[in-house]
Image: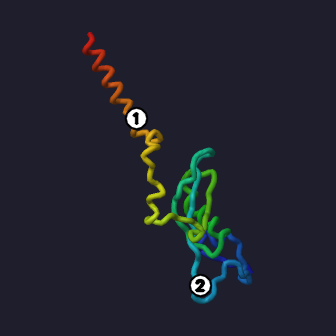
Amino acid sequence: MKIDSLDPRIARANLDSNSQEGELHAMDHFQTYEVFEQKKRGTHHMHVGSVHAPNAELAMLFAKEQYTRRGQCVNIWVVQTSEILVTQYEDADMFENTPSKLHRDPNSYKVMDRIQAYKERQKNKA
């Protein structure tokens, strides 16, 4: 027997009442998935939000319904939040530049200052 629901996401999933797919046991909770979407081919995927679902397949369905129905989207990623690796704030020193590599920092190049100085020199010559 097919489950009829007012929620279109459940209706589209075509679940039957005997299915064990997505069933939660007592004290279980849905997992949280992070959703990333790509607006156009070749562009970066951007984080757009989170969904709660019992498994990855339903998370993909929920993400599609929630985040792509109004705007243009060519691709979505769904990643379980617990699988995302993060750095610790105590490890911030790993992002610091060493003084010997300041040439990699674009702020060390004062191009506009040099252009202005050149224009001032040209103005003084005239």
What residue does disc 2 label?
A: 28
Quadrant holding the C terminus = top left
Residue farthest to the top?
126
Q: Residue 90 at x, y = what percent?
A: 44, 66
Where disc 2 sits, the SS reads loop
Q: Please, what is the three-letter code of the amino acid marked with disc 2?
A: Asp
What residue does disc 1 label?
A: 109
Tally of marks: 2
Q: Residue at x 57, y 66 (%)?
A: 84
Q: Residue at x 71, y 72 (%)?
A: 14
Q: Residue at x 60, y 73 (%)?
A: 53
Image quadrant where residue 56 sits: bottom right
In the image, 26: left or right of 121?
A: right
Image quadrant where residue 93 sits: bottom left
How crowded pointer 2 is (Cα within 10 Å; few <14, some 14-19, many 20+) is rated as few
Q: Residue at x 74, y 83 (%)?
A: 18
Q: Nearer the viewer, residue 65 or 29?
A: 29
Q: Residue 98 at x, y = what percent?
A: 45, 49
How crowded pointer 1 is (Cα within 10 Å; few <14, some 14-19, many 20+) is rated as few
Q: Which mark is residue 101?
A: none
Q: Nearer the viewer, residue 81 or 20?
A: 81
